[in-house]
Amino acid sequence: MGIQERREREKRIRRQQIMVAAKNVFSDKGFNRTTMEDIANRAELSPGTLYLYFKNKEELYASLSIDIMEYLVERLENLLGQNDLGMGPEQKVDALMDVLFNVYEHDPLLIINVFHLQSSETLKNLSPELLSEIENISRRAIGAFVKIYIEGRDKGIFIDKHPIALADILWSLFSGVLLWEESKKIINKDKDFIEETLRIAFEVFIRGLKKTDG
Amino acid sequence: MGIQERREREKRIRRQQIMVAAKNVFSDKGFNRTTMEDIANRAELSPGTLYLYFKNKEELYASLSIDIMEYLVERLENLLGQNDLGMGPEQKVDALMDVLFNVYEHDPLLIINVFHLQSSETLKNLSPELLSEIENISRRAIGAFVKIYIEGRDKGIFIDKHPIALADILWSLFSGVLLWEESKKIINKDKDFIEETLRIAFEVFIRGLKKTDG
Amino acid sequence: MGIQERREREKRIRRQQIMVAAKNVFSDKGFNRTTMEDIANRAELSPGTLYLYFKNKEELYASLSIDIMEYLVERLENLLGQNDLGMGPEQKVDALMDVLFNVYEHDPLLIINVFHLQSSETLKNLSPELLSEIENISRRAIGAFVKIYIEGRDKGIFIDKHPIALADILWSLFSGVLLWEESKKIINKDKDFIEETLRIAFEVFIRGLKKTDG
Amino acid sequence: MGIQERREREKRIRRQQIMVAAKNVFSDKGFNRTTMEDIANRAELSPGTLYLYFKNKEELYASLSIDIMEYLVERLENLLGQNDLGMGPEQKVDALMDVLFNVYEHDPLLIINVFHLQSSETLKNLSPELLSEIENISRRAIGAFVKIYIEGRDKGIFIDKHPIALADILWSLFSGVLLWEESKKIINKDKDFIEETLRIAFEVFIRGLKKTDG
DNA sequence: CATGAATGAGGCTTCATTCAT
DNA sequence: AATGAATGAAGCCTCATTCAT
């Protein structure tokens, strides 16, 4: 009777195993130079097996990105769940940035991949199902910030702007800084300024969001 | 002896011709799905000829991106050259954003390609020469903003932060918004909010930059 | 001890079930584009099970073709069994064609497959057992016509030719018309002339067979 | 100035070279078990080169079949061109069969391939251009026989039937006999009865076509 | 300089078949 | 006997790059 369930579980595990392998290889070599065989080798499976779990390379890649997004969104929604703890909207935006940065640290290369995913070239080749999954997860991420912002606005702390535009800007700022700083690392192998720059970016952003008058 | 120069000039022209063709095709199809033959066809040349002017596909692509960056930097430096015209630092940041947006409108798809270029996957394959060219051009772009910022800071208008970090943030904000809004267009084909979102982003950014106290 | 027999019977049934499924899928998609998984799905079995009943895809396919041939031959032999009913040899050839056409109508796509089977490419891969089974069944089919023909010849109705050659010609004519008309249907989707053409073909054939003089 | 033409000629030659190689390999191994690499090897070219001349395997195969059909049709039309030479319609049908058989002897394996081509499975994958080319060539082949038949009918020699149906039957009889006798050769490696059987088939067919009365 | 035919390595993917459960 | 996940060989095809003309 548990046989059905065991199968289910094993299937999930196998899927996970592939995704972990894929994540590593994609991280090492980038999307284009990663071959399905590379992934299969890393997963200690045969190439054919990958196709039992993912329709093709693109969808494997997208699934990976969705996974990390999902993790991110969960973390964001958790943040909001633990209502208040005495945090004002301003602190919440701060906390939100901490979550973003945490997730990035936990999975630095994959978050870069999410941007790659964003590139239209990739998006155009995905199945409608995956696209709508991405849309959905994005919506939830946006929602998390919107909620914080509206609370702040209603309390008279934040200026009045279109909430979704602000959410987009927040995400753009975050992802833009990551992408840019990562590429700076390639060009000149200086110290890594990511966290520092991110903190300044958010500080400025929050200042810009707040009403100035006393 | 003018023969030497004519050769030079013709070579430059031919190079330009290829880059224009490449730009168009890359814009239409993205980097990966563009073939050298596509570009050759569009340029009305043979594939072999492309290799007389560019070492390989990656470098052709990078040259393209550098070109648009160069154009952008020239525009930025011009902006600063026409000293003052009575503009305060704040207006100058506004003007700077206008330049960024202008260039984007003039070449919307290519600027997306610049981000692709930023992706580590591409950067890792470039020759040292190109890499340093990119580094140089970036430095100049950064310099343009830094100059404005320092003027503002010294006049007591802007808060005191690391100038280069702020420049990075500005660029990240701009490129992040473009990339994100472009990908939103793919996912749901709504209206295009790029300009609107960019304006809000810069407004908030400038507010965040300014000292608040009277 | 009936247990043994039940097993046998069940095995036969299962085998049949697979063949029915295979027939349908082969008919829909042709031999090459049919996968064993397709067949397993249609039979509501697992791919592995198929191999308990058939050595491989080719032999499953051949078995199928033999089956329909066997059905055909039974029908032909029945026709001859019901001795005379007052039919002369000429009417018998007519009746024979009716049987052929009936079987074709009952299983239109499969009979095409028989021709595919005939194609040397397929035959070369069959096991000796299957090959001799095919030979045997062919011989019986040929025999049916030969019997009719000899009756006619001995009665002075038909001209004197090598009986087996004539049998071959009859079958060739029938299968040739089917194959050709089927392919014409693909090329231009006109009306289907199969029956009409077949009737004319047999009319001419019988005329050619008959002695002309009074 | 002849450079253009030389290119043209070389291109044609190269195409031919590939088709010859393909014909040989297809003949040896059949369509499915022939790989593009096999053909490339036989042609002493690289696999990629094949694709400069043929869109894919199916179309290379179809081109081959069309070629032999074209040759056949030319022979048929020549036959009719050399008007009369005192041949009556009856002798012309005989001569027509000789041509068919000649072509078969000249290219025995390829004509089998034409039948393979006829199989719907293959036809369904061809480009519209090739399909219409096939349609056209078939029409011409049919036309050749129709002309002879009508002459005979108008002279009161042949019975009155739908001419195209008769043409179809003639072709079906010819191709059916070839296909069937070829497959008999596989099953039991007796002597080859092809020519003998074909002659009888045509004799009977012509008898059936002729009016019987004095 | 320009050409463009040729190369050939290598990628993605399919699918007949096997085998541990 | 049945399963069905896993295999892995092999095929088709693409395309950046080269080189003889």
Image (cartoon, coloured by chain):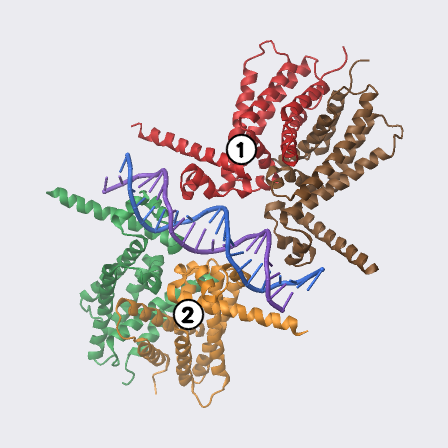
Chain colours: A orange, B green, C brown, D red, E purple, F blue
Seen as rendered, the residue at the extreme bottom is A86
Q: Residue at x 65, y 36 (%)?
A: D187
The tag on residue D196 is none
Dot 1: chain letter: D
Rendered image quadrant of residue C170: top right
Whether discs 2 and 1 lie on one chain: the answer is no
* Residue labelled with disc 2: A110
Judged left or right of residue D194, residue B106 is left
> Up-down: is C116 above or below A74?
above
- Foreground of the two, B14 or B77: B14
Quadrant showing the N terminus of chain C: bottom right
Q: Label 1 is placed on what type of residue?
A: Ser
Q: Label 2 is placed on what type of residue?
A: Leu
The tag on residue D65 is 1
Residue C9's x, y, as percent?
Answer: 79, 55
> Up-down: is D82 above or below C121?
above
**Tally of marks:** 2
Quadrant showing the C terminus of chain C: top right
Dot 2: chain letter: A
Q: Residue at x 40, y 64 (%)?
A: A116
Residue B54's x, y, as percent?
Answer: 27, 51
Rendered image quadrant of residue B95: bottom left
Q: Secondary structure at mark 2?
A: helix
Judged left or right of residue C107, residue B86 is left
- Foreground of the two, C205 or D81: C205
CB within 8 Å, label 2 to label 1 = no
Instruction: Bin the neighbour count of mark 1 within 10 Å (Cα to Cα): few under 14, some 14-19, many 20 and up.
Output: many
- Foreground of the two, A160 or B78: B78
**Residue A123 appears in the figure:** yes
Q: CA distance from mark 2 to mark 1?
A: 53 Å
Judged left or right of residue D37, residue B200 is left
> Up-down: is D74 above or below A32?
above
